[in-house]
Amino acid sequence: MPHIWVEYSANLESRIDVSGLLKTTQDALIGDGAIFPFAGARTRGVPVANYLIVDGHPDNAFVHVMLRIAKGRSDEDKKAAARRVFDAVKAYLAAVSAASPLGISVQMEEADETLNFKTSNYRDYLKQRGNPEKPEA
């Protein structure tokens, strides 16, 4: 963990670089890797083809970021991390927001530790590739 879902209205695909948005979002949450593990990050872009935003005008768009984290961080750390992501996403989408109707939201949830099962070998492969476990600051 963390797991990151970036949902966005499909009408944004021609106006934004989705890969860039995903990287911006993940980088903002992970930071230096001190609070959230780099090797635990899973970030997905989820285009939503069917949606109704406000009055249904085809120019209306949205980006919603869901951050799911494991328990164990202070409220201050969680709030600061969510704010970093919100600010980074807003900055990344500033040009779109200036030119068209756009809603941006960020939500953080803690996973229920009794119902959360996971395994991965990502750290092994990071080592094999010569990548550090913590991203460069």
Image (cartoon, rainbow, N blue to C red):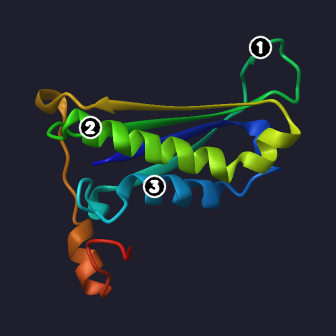
Q: Does the rendering let one see residue 16?
A: yes
The residue nearer to you, when weighing 111 against 107, is 107
Relative to residue 60, is residue 135 drawn left or right? Answer: left
Element marked by disc 1: loop
Relative to residue 40, is residue 42 drawn left or right? Answer: right
Residue at coordinates 63% horizontally, 61% vertically from top-left? 20
Count every numbered label the image shows and give the total.
Answer: 3
Looking at the rendered image, the quarter that the C terminus falls into is bottom left
Q: Answer whether labels 3 and 2 touch (C-beta < 8 Å).
A: no
Question: Residue 111's mark?
Answer: none
Element marked by disc 3: helix
Q: Does the rendering let one see residue 69?
A: no
Q: Answer whether labels 1 and 2 touch (C-beta < 8 Å).
A: no
Residue denoted by label 2 = 76
The residue nearer to you, when weighing 28 against 39, is 28
Residue at coordinates 73% horizontally, 47% vertically from top-left? 94
Q: Residues within 10 Å of mark 1 (few under 14, many from 20)?
A: few
Residue denoted by label 1 = 54
**Displayed quadrant of residue 80:** top left
The alpha-carbon separation of the residues under discs 1 and 2 comes to 33 Å
Relative to residue 90, is residue 132 drawn left or right? Answer: left
Question: Residue 28's mark?
Answer: 3
Question: Which amino acid, by three-letter code, is at mark 2?
Answer: Glu
Q: In the rendering, at what x and y percent does residue 26 appear?
A: 45, 55
Asked if residue 110 is positioned above or below residue 17 in the image, the reply reads above
Q: In the rendering, at what x and y percent does residue 24 appear?
A: 54, 58
For marks 3 and 2 on the same chain, the one whose residue lies earlier in the sequence: 3
Residue at coordinates 79% horizontally, 49% vertically from top-left? 95
